[in-house]
Amino acid sequence: MVARTLLQQALPTTFGLKAAGWMTGLDEAITRLIAVETKRLAVQLGGAGGTLASLGDRGPQVVRLMAEELGLQEPTLPWHTDRTRIAELAGALGEAAGVIAKIASDVVLLSQTEVSEVRDTAPDRGGSSALPQKRNPVAAVSAIACAQPAPQLVAALLGAMAHEHDRAAGAWHAEWRPFSELFRSVGSAAAWLRDCLEHLEPDLDAMRRNLELTRGAIMAERVAGVLAPALGASQAQELVRACALEAQSSGRPLADVLATRSEISDHLSIEAVAQLLEPTGYLGSAGLFVDRALEAHRVGRSAPSPASG
Amino acid sequence: MVARTLLQQALPTTFGLKAAGWMTGLDEAITRLIAVETKRLAVQLGGAGGTLASLGDRGPQVVRLMAEELGLQEPTLPWHTDRTRIAELAGALGEAAGVIAKIASDVVLLSQTEVSEVRDTAPDRGGSSALPQKRNPVAAVSAIACAQPAPQLVAALLGAMAHEHDRAAGAWHAEWRPFSELFRSVGSAAAWLRDCLEHLEPDLDAMRRNLELTRGAIMAERVAGVLAPALGASQAQELVRACALEAQSSGRPLADVLATRSEISDHLSIEAVAQLLEPTGYLGSAGLFVDRALEAHRVGRSAPSPASG
Amino acid sequence: MVARTLLQQALPTTFGLKAAGWMTGLDEAITRLIAVETKRLAVQLGGAGGTLASLGDRGPQVVRLMAEELGLQEPTLPWHTDRTRIAELAGALGEAAGVIAKIASDVVLLSQTEVSEVRDTAPDRGGSSALPQKRNPVAAVSAIACAQPAPQLVAALLGAMAHEHDRAAGAWHAEWRPFSELFRSVGSAAAWLRDCLEHLEPDLDAMRRNLELTRGAIMAERVAGVLAPALGASQAQELVRACALEAQSSGRPLADVLATRSEISDHLSIEAVAQLLEPTGYLGSAGLFVDRALEAHRVGRSAPSPASG
Amino acid sequence: MVARTLLQQALPTTFGLKAAGWMTGLDEAITRLIAVETKRLAVQLGGAGGTLASLGDRGPQVVRLMAEELGLQEPTLPWHTDRTRIAELAGALGEAAGVIAKIASDVVLLSQTEVSEVRDTAPDRGGSSALPQKRNPVAAVSAIACAQPAPQLVAALLGAMAHEHDRAAGAWHAEWRPFSELFRSVGSAAAWLRDCLEHLEPDLDAMRRNLELTRGAIMAERVAGVLAPALGASQAQELVRACALEAQSSGRPLADVLATRSEISDHLSIEAVAQLLEPTGYLGSAGLFVDRALEAHRVGRSAPSPASG
């Protein structure tokens, strides 16, 4: 399929590599969430001011038993005014929201009528109250909408870390709604993205059609690269650029324009050019990267959970 | 010294416990920053669209050599559009800013003319252009000012994670200034806090004076706790509350008011009350918590750096 | 051209209406900025604590003269700790950034290789270091990138409004960098957008081509609307929806599928259907709205400036 | 009472001026909210894509009638993707939150046990479950807590302004929860602040006591100002600064230290110094500013509402 940069067709890639990038992002967000869950969720018990004075000398013992009972870590100190745990959990949730937004945004862009490279196949999905023909990518749109407020909710929690003295005069209470909203935001976004991906169907014909849309121009980097040893990198780049722009403005295939330039035909036969312009021959390490991503995913999944390790 | 909750005097604590809380927050923020530095800073090289096609089949090898050369991790995949690494670094910086803001805010509150429990002893510090008598807690104020925009800068970076397709049309470039500003914000805040803490001098007389400001009322929890077995927790609490309010409105010591109530004097002699109202006898596990914090700090410091481990 | 909702082709509109929407947004943002400039920029002079005591009884006179000298408003009170003026200026800048981001984002989407309805004609613009064929919509992308951090900078300023007492202990100083960054963000975004719009060229052929991409399906609302009186709104909608989906999956024109359904052909001749499916006949009030927007723009431009009025 | 800058005692002011500053901030926030309410709340009706095509040529008439029916403005254009109205309402709410946070924060600081210059007299308010003596400034703390997330919610709305094309693919839906939360945040904060201010009682004795806390040092600016003509501004400032610091470190009244310096006693008699150190004689334009603020408040209140004007 086409790789797109700045929303312009750039060069060929594979759907596998795109999906591997999505998976890797999700895996990293999950890894971080699990790390916070297993290492940073600790019981908080400090009494009225952090000394546990009302429990006499049994304070630490009570904390330990309470931690065991709740399946939480036992902290070094009561942490009522040390909000690093909240900050790390919020940060991990914000990271997850960003990954979800990236994937869902790609799906929406690939679903555009003019692109049509993926389709949400969930039954009875995406109809419009007004427009009979519409099949809106509802799950992806909902994932974007749910994830979008997350960064500000993270900022609200980070901005509330300056708890005054031994219990805050407002900053603590200011955490409650943003924290709830953050879980709601990221949890809903994740649920919508799962729904979206479970019903996502790539359209291979559309991918191939879009690869051919520029009549070879997306292969320009490769042609310039092959000509560079003979012509010099800069001149090769300039020459192919001129041909690509001429092909675009005239609507002719890049191969035809290239064939009219003797600087090129001196070095490349028509057959050689035709072979160079075949997208499947210019996928670089896409396949290897996919293998690596799958391997990392398998290793991550089979790793003993940090909690039980 | 006095522990304060909602900016009201609450019960006794120690300056050591307060400082241990500051240290623990800083240690946690540092631990997180080191974890991001050692595990999540990876080289990014993916070519024009993430496939490294222009490098033929040598792409991964170039990535590996480049990572070695730069002392960075080698990633599973090119990560130009997977911003989890940026998000985690931003989150760790935001966490550090929050810890700094908490400590600096405590220092400013303790420096208030009416509280005066700490003083910034840096020479020629804190004069005012207009007010000859002023000794402003400049380092702490500057730390607060520098740290304050950090949460929003983190949000700007989290909100820019949805990179379109294989290179973003704006979101990538939108990271640059907020990212620079975030380093500047947290770095400057940290430098000011170090300056502040290096010159910070506690005023033990003022601490003792403030402990006595309520004429015993900050010990009310302890009195109620001692009476609870005999009177019932709720009734003891009500009774001591009434005495504390009466002491406050009349300006009399709590001990005197308590002595007028037979429900109390039946159970507690004047000497017993006097002993109960001594703040140093009601510090709970403050000392133990300080020992624990110092031990955790020592262990953290001597741990082999994750990078060299 | 095609109107798109949720990034799906929806129904016809005109480029004029789209541009009128852009203009109206810009006009509203400009109106708000001018209102803040003319009504809310006031001199601030209050002395060390807001009483102007050091000026004896000449304080207000000095304030008035200073306001005249600087061409600023004279405030009711010194406003060192009342940051509503900053908040309103920040809000107006944030609003402008949002309008700019919307327009630039539309331009980037319309510039996609697969859509190609507009083109940035600035000479020597948008080349790629690697990809010879690229013509990136650089001005629009830069406008997006510059505008994107603005909301967080506004939040930083709103979040710094709680100045303590008579001069803040950090919140005031915390305004400086975000405020500078906000001007830089919005000013740069505006400059890039002006550049973008000055060089923007619509491609009418591409617009017509995209209108025909769905082979009539974007006219489905109109067909359903015409059938509604005879069939009932709900049944007409269902019927046309079924036809649109069939047309889409089979790749046949909507007209052909409609012709196969007797419920439709009973009410609409082939000629009537053909006429209904002509996009230029279903533009609603687009033309009127454009006239209105232009009239409002002219009135706004010719209005006496609030400053000189 | 004492004016405080950077949370240090600075010079005298009046409670009236402080309260006038609060009132002015509230009046400005209210003025802005009313302006948005009366000028910027418009009906939105544009049909599926902004052309109102489904209403034939009656679109604008329907919009007008709908606006009348709902008591909303009639917009120039459908504004589904022009979010300036939302941005301005959000900005006005964020401004109000900032004003509320400033006032509530002052109340909390003035309520500190060590300051005690105001008291929340609401009955049965502010008790603590653990600490019998506590009278927490609950209303002010709640106002702070409710107002604190508002800036981020404003940012969430500003950040969602880039609606794609003719209806957004997520950004529109992303407004809903932050918008609701913003109303909840600011509405709750306003309700708590009203409660707080209705029950707020200044403690004049405490104010006088705190004025005397520095034994004259808060009058240092005045003394330096009077000596400046004779000694030069810079030398007068230096001299008084030295005396103020000596008074502070030795615990002696500033008057006594000043009397030991011949450079001062040459110019000022003991009686003259005593008079200079009287705080009520150094209030500058505080009274005039209060009068002005009250006048502006009266004018604002009696102004014909913009809606009915």
Image (spheres, coloured by chain):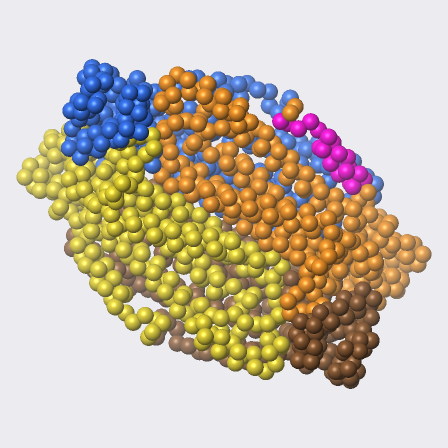
Chain colours: A blue, B orange, C yellow, D brown
Across and down, in percent, residue A250 comes to: 15, 33
Query: Which residue is drawn at the image coordinates 55% and 67% (left, top)?
Result: C80
Quick check: is B304 in the magenta stretch? yes
Answer yes or no: is residue C227 visible: no
Relative placement, left or right, of B96 versus C298 is: right
Q: D163 or C223, which lies in front?
A: D163
Answer yes or no: is residue A208 visible: yes
Q: Quadrant of residue D112?
A: bottom right
State whether residue D206 is above or below residue D127. below
State whether residue D167 is above or below residue D250. above
Relative placement, left or right, of D184 versus C228 is: right
Query: Which residue is drawn at the image coordinates 68% and 38% (left, top)?
Result: B27
Across and down, in percent, residue C124 comes to: 27, 41
Across and down, in percent, residue D230 comes to: 69, 80
Q: C240 or B288, which lies in front?
A: B288
> Looking at the figure, which quarter contains the C terminus of chain C?
bottom left
Across and down, in percent, residue A37 comes to: 60, 32
Relative placement, left or right, of B258 versus A103 is: right
Query: Which residue is drawn at the image coordinates 37% and 62% (left, top)?
Result: C32
> Looking at the figure, which quarter contains the N terminus of chain C?
top left
Q: D105 or A135, which lies in front?
A: D105
Quick check: is A139 in the magenta stretch? no
Query: Which residue is drawn at the image coordinates 52% and 59% (left, top)?
Result: D97
Would you say the magenta stretch is mainly helix, strand or loop? helix
**Which residues fall within the magenta stretch?**
B288-307
